[in-house]
Amino acid sequence: MSTAAKVFDPLENHLLSALPDSVYRRLRGELQPAPLALGQVVYESGQELDHVYFPTSCVVSLLYTMRDGSTAEMGLTGNDGIVGVAL
């Protein structure tokens, strides 16, 4: 089994791949891979959002934590979406 690292391809995100070529070329220089570990928090509620994430090979859960500490999944984003944009 190969252990070679997967090459970062932003176009695996459907939103990025749907952009007109001229727009994508303008953004491409700003896109960077952001490896995420299972369970890693991307941002907390109330935090300033410095980055947006275009998932390519992962799923990001949007969780709400209740006063008693329990959590509920409020959304799910994969390679068809974006994370880090305030709704």
Image (cartoon, rainbow, N blue to C red):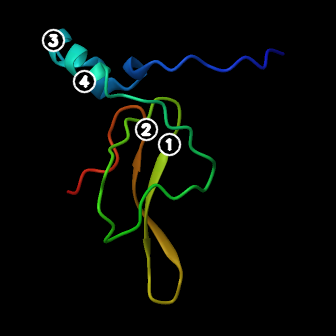
Which secondary structure, mark 4?
Answer: helix
Q: Residue sitting at 20 percent across and 19 percent down?
A: 26
Mark 4 sits on what residue? 27
Dot in front, 2 or 4: 4
Dot in front, 1 or 4: 4
Q: Residue 65: image x %, image y %?
A: 45, 76
Mark 1 sits on what residue? 59
Which secondary structure, mark 1?
Answer: loop
Q: Quick one: label 1 or label 4, which is nearer the N terminus? A: 4
The residues bearing labels 3 and 2 have C-alpha atoms spaced at a distance of 24 Å
Q: Residues within 10 Å of mark 4 (few under 14, many from 20)?
A: few
Give the number of the disc on residue 23: none
Q: Amino acid at mark 3?
A: Ser
Quarter of the image where one finds residue 79: top left
Nearer-the-camera pick, 30 or 3? 30
Mark 2 sits on what residue? 78
Q: Quick one: label 3 or label 4, which is nearer the N terminus? A: 3
